[in-house]
Amino acid sequence: MRARRKISGRRAKGPSFLSRASKAFFSGAALVAVLVFAWPGVCRAQDRVHTVYFEGSDHELNVYRIHGKEKGKTLMLVGGIQGDEPGGFLSADLYADLTLARGGLIVVPRANFQSIVLKKRKVNEDMNRKFAGAQKGNYEAKIVGILKKLIAESDCLLNLHDGSGFFSEKWESPQRNPKRYGQSIIADTDVHHTDTGQTVFLGRMAREVARQINLRVKNPDHYFKFNNHNTRHRSTLHREQRKSATYYALYQCGIPAFGVETSKSLPLRLKVRHHNLAINAFMDVMGIVPETPGINLSDPELKYLVILVNGMLPVALKNNETLHVGKGDTIRVSHIEANYERGLSVDVLGHGALNDIKRDIKIRKPVHIIVRKDYSPCGRIDVAVSKKTKGVYVSSSPGEKPRRSLVFILRVNGEERTAGGGERLDLTRGDRLEIVDVEAQDIPSPDLTVNFKGFVGDKNVNRGEDRGYVIDTKKDLWKRYSWRKNGKTYRIVVHYHGADIGTLWVNLN
């Protein structure tokens, strides 16, 4: 296993590795997300280090190390170690992009990504019961091995969970009693004396954190309490916790460790908010100075997928579009663009594995591609197959005639941009536009004719070929050739052997 390290932050710089064709449809925020690599010796000089383990697998593990401007304590956040507890992993995810004035964070938003996608507590074994003794050689054991190393780099561990009911030190009801976990800060003991002679006051820390949280919680029924499991004591109610991450962190690494449990009975937004309050309070206790993240829980939505067909020109497909390929063609989903950056996976149903991002899959019959944000489907692309298909085509609705996949390479005011066939290019009147080229997967560029309807480059000999001209969109366009003669919308039409094979719409504001 090799981990890949990605560097970001104000001081991270590096070259772009995308070719012109590979940049197709990667504009705006997607281009900003181009990754820059660095050697381990460089990593500590950065604000944020992103390391990926088991990349492209169903259990891909993303780890974010965040370093403040000033040195201080390091807090480790683990979310999603059990996949059916979204409050924890959605809260941890908000801290992966945080910047710090002092101290450090190690953020593992989705420790058990496979169980999150399946919305299950476990896949093979409960990952939070694998921190003690010899382990089976499954993926859970491999991830736990990495988490142990990260714990050793930390000064405190928070394991973020959603628990059943509401914890109370005395019996009040079936949903509020000592055996419930919700709305509590759990530790394995109140006070711990380490082998090096230090004393760890877990109860003191937890009570102070609960006090800070409760100042911001309106409903007294939702107040947090310290939940001492007394895990080592022979009379404990929680012997199984001796195999947990917090027990390992305290008794093997000598650092304070807590389970933060919001109640599963609460709405998701409230659970995330309470986790945030707990994390921020622990930061305050440890002297870590953050910029508190906001809560973004908008519905996940796929913007587009980028798919390579037979390893050639990338095709961008919007949500619910259909990709038309030939029988036996190979597809590879190379990029997901959505309104979230993390927790995304692609499942080519009936093929590959649970997460098929960047897998080569041979298509012999129609398939559905499902895009998920964690466990929630957020998009779908259909793949249609025809023995007669030559090239790659896209359609937006069942009755629509498939259109050929095209990439328009443009310059707007001297800056290179790309757009796909059928898309709309929004410009400000007076912008200077140059059609650099058009690329189609199976047609040589010189065999294409690219005509901007309403513009004539050579008024002496109008061949209908408008690549290479710089078009002043205020002076050079003829209104009578605009769409419905409105003077605002124009078409760039691509012809092949006289046939119209694609259009880019240009809208002037």
Image (cartoon, rainbow, N blue to C red):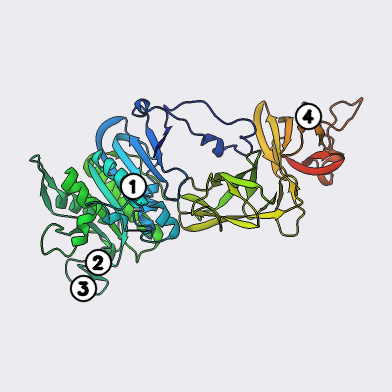
Q: Nearer the viewer, mark 4 or mark 1?
A: 1
Helix, strand or loop for disc 1: helix
Q: Callout 3: few (<14), some (14-19), or many (20+) C-alpha neighbours within 10 Å?
A: few
**Type of residue at label 4?**
Arg
Q: Nearer the viewer, mark 4 or mark 3?
A: 4
Q: Nearer the viewer, mark 2 or mark 1?
A: 1
Q: Earlier in the sequence, mark 3 or mark 2?
A: 3
Residue 500, image quadrant: top right
**Type of residue at label 3?**
Glu
> Alpha carbon of mark 3 to alpha carbon of mark 1: how far?
41 Å
> Alpha carbon of mark 4 to alpha carbon of mark 3: how far?
77 Å
Residue 100 at x, y percent in the picture:
33, 36
**Type of residue at label 2?**
Arg
Report whether 436 appears left or right of 197: right
Q: Callout 2: few (<14), some (14-19), or many (20+) C-alpha neighbours within 10 Å?
A: many
Residue found 63% across the figure and 46% down from its top: 330
Residue 298 at x, y percent in the picture:
49, 54
Q: Nearer the viewer, mark 3 or mark 2?
A: 2
**Rendered image: mark on residue 142:** 1
Residue marked by disc 4:
467
**Rendered image: mark on residue 172:** 3
> Mark 4 touching mark 2, by CB under 8 A?
no
